[in-house]
Image (cartoon, rainbow, N blue to C red):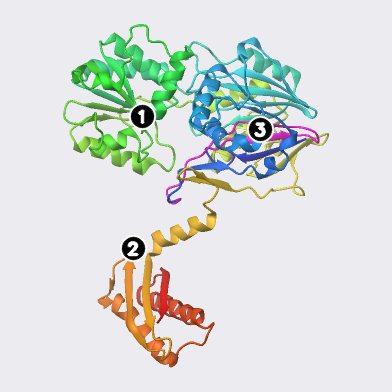
Amino acid sequence: MRLIFLGGIGEVGKNLFLLETDRDIVVIDCGLGFPEEDEFGIDIVLPDITYLRERRDKLRGIFITHGHEDHIGGLAYLWPELGAPVYATKLTAGLIEGKLREAKLLGKVPIQVFDPDERPKLDAGDFSVEPFRVCHSIPDAVGFGITTPAGLIVHTSDFKFDPTPIDGKQSDFTLLEHFGDRGVTLLISDCVHVESTGWTKSERVVGQTYEEIFAQAPGRIIIATFASLIARVQQVIDVAAAHGRRVATLGRSLEGNVRIATELGYLNDPDGVLIPAKVARGMNPKDLVYVVTGSQGEPMAVLNRISNGEHRDIEIGPGDTVIVSATPIPGNETSVFKIIDRLFGLGAEVIYAARALVHVSGHASQDELVRMLELTRPEHVLPTHGEQRHLALYTELAVGTGVPREHILHVGLGDVVRIDGDGVHIDEEEGPLDVGHVYVEGGIVGETTDEMLDARKVLAREGVVAVTVVIDELTGELLSGPDATIRGFSPMRRGIDLVAGVEDRIEDLVDDYGEPPAEGEWRHLERMIRDEISDYFWSSARRRPTVVVSLHAV
């Protein structure tokens, strides 16, 4: 049997891995990722499913662990190429359907809803999948025990062992211990929070912080959080009700998730504090709480527009309290703190993770990771959902519990993990597969390539020079120009006028050419001009700008 990660290993986001026998394949999760700061123009990043597309006839099911974007966000883009039934809990299925509705796929995707408390066994070809409840930062999250021809695999998914979860549903320790008694061949464990000692704090401590802030806030309260953090929205509703405030949500994804969670019974509002944003516009600010998107500094999200004074409903000023109820994902720190600085500049009181306990992780800290190892007692371990430092630190943690170092796998995207009578090992003959990324830009999937992104990085780093040259096709003399335009850096360098320098070099080159290019040689002259400009900028300014030459013969 083979196990292959197409996303979510050595990175945070776009989770997707598959288990494969000669006859059948099952997929775990189908998420998306968000672009790095230097991936200019990209909206989202998807896993490369070329391997699956070529084996679509073997795919028996897509099993989803929970409703976060990095686990379900790829379905609306990739399902048409996969075509398999999707298995999910009730809330997760509702959130998936919301995305499918936007993509005009609702009703086309077969979704099988399961209840983990019923201990179902979901058969999919050579595999039998047993979901078990785990605590996370969204309700209805599960891991999977997967019985395969090569043994039992336990996938923790994103988890922590919260003793007092908001929905009252704790992780299923009994089933995890039962898996350990049966014998776990491989544990695939979340490790992204391994740098933190002890146990991750319960979600309930955030509610206690909200109580203190709500009691002191003189005016409007604005809380920015993840759109899928349903448990956090429930806490806002509960505390707002206790303080006589009403709650409005802003942000399309957040509004949709709140509506779905309310309809399915995962959000409770017995006091009717939730109101539409249009109703909130006419209310006294001190009676209001807004829950908004943008906790990660997203340019188009509500919090960023508020901080820039561009939101039609909210204009920040003294008396407002803004709570950024999230920790920046690595890479987002600069964007988040720019927003926080702007909000302070507008006179708001801004509370964030460095100032108060307004966010706790949904992932297990060291003692919980050890507890998972103790419950399942696996023969082999594969840490996932983390970057390289997390994988390395988790390895040391697992070795400390008695797992042999040689039984801990460090796997990369596209590696083929073989599970057979010889144990669990990376098959270096079959892999690694050529696994890349698929970019979504402006709603179009797959047209943007790595080469295009590399070109954008060069443009951003080195700038661009555009030159227009008009030559008499009969005499070879300059008729117009050369005209040079520089973008992305100063046209002056150490007192040298680079524009004038470029134009002089081109004039000399054309004069030296001496005669009109013969038929078929115009491209050669264009290339000579481009090379001359490149050499000039390197010698004069130590830059390698992108050079665009427009050569016209008249």
Three-letter code, disc 3: Gly
The residue under label 3 is 83
In the image, residue 286 lies in the stretch drawn in magenta:
no
Q: Residue at x 41, y 10 (%)?
A: 268
Examine the rendered structure and indicate whether residue 317 appears above or below residue 465. Answer: above
Answer above or below: position of 484 versus 112. below
How far across and how far down the image is residue 228, in percent? 45, 26
Let me know if residue 26 is in the magenta part: yes
For badge 1, the amino acid type reads Gly
Q: Quadrant of residue 497?
A: bottom left
Residue 166 appears in the picture as rendered: no
Which residue is painted at 39% across and 86% down in the image?
Answer: 472
Q: Position of residue 433 (x, y in %)?
A: 69, 48
Amino acid type assigned to the residue bearing label 2 in the image: Gly
Main SS category, magenta section: loop
Left or right of 67 on screen, residue 185 = right
Name the image quarter holding the N terminus.
top right
Q: Residue at x 35, y 24 (%)?
A: 357
Query: Which residue position is annotated with label 1?
Result: 251
Q: Nearer the viewer, residue 165 or 129?
A: 129
